[in-house]
């Protein structure tokens, strides 16, 4: 039974209850609005952080697709090749590099089209000499030699994208160009939890359009400023002559291209690393 005191306080109790309920509803509405704004902001941030979503639209068909075969000009001893420097400037907007910066740093890269039994000893030499290299691989190479690719990654080397099927990239459509990059990219990422960022054009054949496609895939195109005929497995160059040629080809920012299928490269690699260092150069990473 309600007493008189309770009856007198009842209007006040009801008023407090109404205020509390309204306040709770207001807070819920405010929180709901805040949550919606947060979700919207997160979507904006996600879009901004997506490297593809924020990229400007490119009319690839308007870009020149003339195939250019890359081979650096004759290098005088310890001098930077002028054609590589010119290409650095010409194709700078496409994130392409043909020779490194004009410092004493030099870079070692290997193209891996197939395995010929020399990659493991090459990795042994690099480990002994404390040098890191870039290994540009194809899908077929990765598929057939996962243990070597894993070793490259585990030992701190860079694994680069040499295309899915090793075609002349300018001969492909824009979509096919993208597929050549991204199919291998996705495979390596899924299999090794490793994301590649450097691309080397098979045979050094490129075009302005293909450079733009590679950049649009989030890659830097890496060419070279020194190479020699080392890929003919049935006609390997003389070791002594090769050491002299490779060492004398050193220059500021040199990007060396060697092929890991070469028995000569395997035999001379340690001497080349030592002799280039003696000239005052530092082996570095791209």
Image (tube, helix red, strand yellow):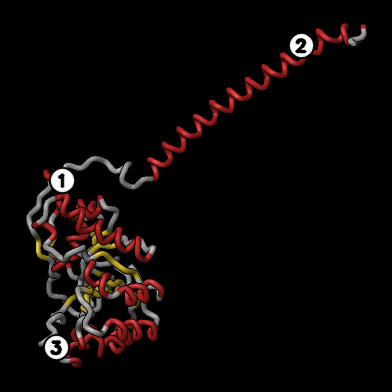
Label 3 environment density (alpha carbons within 10 Å; few <14, some 14–19, many ≥20): some
Query: Residue 248 placed where, x, y %?
Result: 21, 83
The residue under label 1 is: 60
Q: Specify few, some or many for label 1: CA neighbours under 10 Å numbering under 14, 14-19, or 20 or more.
A: some
- Circle 2 is placed at which residue position? 15
| Tag 3 near tag 2, CB within 8 Å | no
**Residue sitting at the far right:** 4
Residue 158, quarter of the rendered image: bottom left
Q: Which residue is drawn at the image coordinates 25% and 69% (left, top)?
A: 137
Labels 3 and 2: the sequence-earlier one: 2
Q: Label 2 crowding class (10 Å Cα cut-off): few <14, some 14-19, many 20+?
A: few
The kind of secondary structure element at disc 1 is: helix
Question: Residue at label 3?
Answer: 237
* Gap in angstroms between the C-alphas marked 2 and 1: 70 Å
Upstream in the sequence, badge 2 or badge 1? 2
Q: Depth check: 104 or 164 in front? A: 164
Mark closest to the chain's N terminus, 1 or 3: 1
Give the SS element for disc 2. Answer: helix
Q: In the displayed structure, does residue 55 sit left or right of residue 170?
A: right
Separation of marks 3 and 2 at Cα, in angstroms: 98 Å
Q: Between residue 144 and residue 81, name the one nearer to us.
A: 144
Residues 267 and 42: in front is: 42
């Amino acid at each position: 039974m309600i007493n008189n005191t309770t009856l007198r306080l009842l209007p006040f109790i009801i008023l407090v209850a109404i205020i509390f309920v309204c306040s709770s509803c207001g807070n819920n509405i405010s929180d709901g609005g805040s949550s919606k704004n947060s979700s919207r902001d997160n979507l904006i941030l996600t879009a901004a952080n997506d490297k593809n979503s924020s990229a400007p639209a490119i009319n690839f068909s308007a870009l020149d697709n003339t195939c250019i075969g890359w081979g650096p000009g004759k290098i005088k001893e310890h001098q930077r090749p002028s054609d590589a420097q010119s290409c650095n400037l010409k194709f700078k907007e496409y994130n392409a590099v043909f020779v490194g910066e004009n410092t004493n740093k030099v870079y070692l890269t290997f193209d891996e089209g197939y395995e010929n039994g020399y990659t493991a000893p090459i990795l042994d030499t690099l480990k002994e000499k404390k040098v890191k290299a870039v290994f540009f691989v194809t899908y077929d190479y990765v598929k057939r030699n996962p243990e070597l690719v894993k070793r490259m990654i585990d030992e701190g080397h860079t694994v680069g994208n040499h295309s899915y099927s090793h075609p002349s990239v300018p001969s492909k459509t824009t979509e096919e160009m993208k597929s050549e990059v991204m199919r291998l990219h996705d495979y390596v990422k899924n299999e090794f939890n490793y994301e590649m960022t450097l691309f080397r054009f098979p045979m050094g054949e490129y075009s302005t359009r293909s450079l733009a496609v590679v950049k649009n895939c989030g890659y830097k195109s890496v060419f070279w400023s020194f190479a020699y005929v080392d890929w003919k497995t049935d006609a390997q160059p003389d070791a002594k002559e090769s050491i002299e040629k490779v060492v004398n080809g050193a220059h500021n920012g040199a990007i060396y291209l060697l092929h890991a299928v070469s028995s000569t490269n395997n035999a001379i690699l340690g001497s080349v690393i030592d002799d280039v260092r003696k000239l005052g150069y530092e082996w570095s990473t791209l």
